[in-house]
Amino acid sequence: MQFPLSPLYHHDPSKATTPLLLLLSLSQSRNLRAMTSSSTPSRKVLSKIASNRLQKEVMEWQTNPPAGFKYKINDNLQRWIIEVAGAPGTLYSGETYQLQVDFPEHYPMEAPQVIFLHPAPLHPHIYSNGHICLDILYDSWSPAMTVSSVCISILSMLSSSPAKQRPADNDRYVRNCRNGRSPKETRWWFHDDKV
């Protein structure tokens, strides 16, 4: 038995746009879903612009990575794991943390989701679940920013901290973020630019 999956459009400049119907058998559609499913079913495939931009950024990281960071190359362009070394002469000197960067379908027009993996550093703007309160990750994002510029901003934020402590509302925030809530779903209030 054949089922229509979705209409596709074939573009030929000499002809009008013609809709084509993609038909798959039930077993073929199950196999297709199994091949494309991931641990995050809502994640969409990167756009061509996002894919090209990320490939360019990977090449940049391979030739000129920002000081204090190591990118662990893998076959998943949508999720990067980046090792962060605390800057010398700061509270975080000699410490190493990991950032997880998840790129949305429309990167760089949309900001990536950036979190610290467990254990997250003690910092007034970093929650124990790894969420980071930093305006460039949300309201102040610009497509001109890169993964390198975001990492440098995060290291600068860490380096300027006068004390290792959690945000005052850490417990309440983390409790409200259970069930995998993304930090991008939070309405952040950026009120303290001292740390």
Image (cartoon, rainbow, N blue to C red):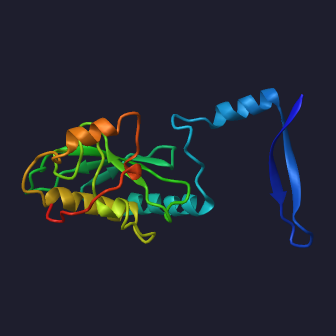
Is 118 or 98 nearer to us in this picture? 118
Look at the picture and state if 48 lies above or below 82: below
**Residue at 84 percent of width and 64 percent of height:** 11
Total tally of numbered discs in the picture: 0
Q: Is residue 159 left or right of residue 34?
A: left
Farthest residue to the right: give it: 15
- Whether residue 166 appears in this view of the structure is yes
Q: Is residue 122 left or right of residue 17?
A: left
Say which quadrant the C terminus sits in. bottom left
**Residue at 51 percent of width and 44 percent of height:** 76
**Residue at 29 percent of width and 54 percent of height:** 69
Is 125 or 96 nearer to us in this picture? 125
Say which quadrant the N terminus sits in. top right
- Whether residue 66 appears in this view of the structure is no
**Residue at 35 percent of width and 55 percent of height:** 187
Q: Is residue 63 left or right of residue 85?
A: right
Q: Position of residue 48 (x, y in %)?
A: 62, 60
Q: Position of residue 150 (x, y in %)?
A: 33, 61
Q: Position of residue 20 (x, y in %)?
A: 88, 52
Q: Where on the picture, by quarter, is residue 68?
A: bottom left
Q: Position of residue 191 (x, y in %)?
A: 21, 63
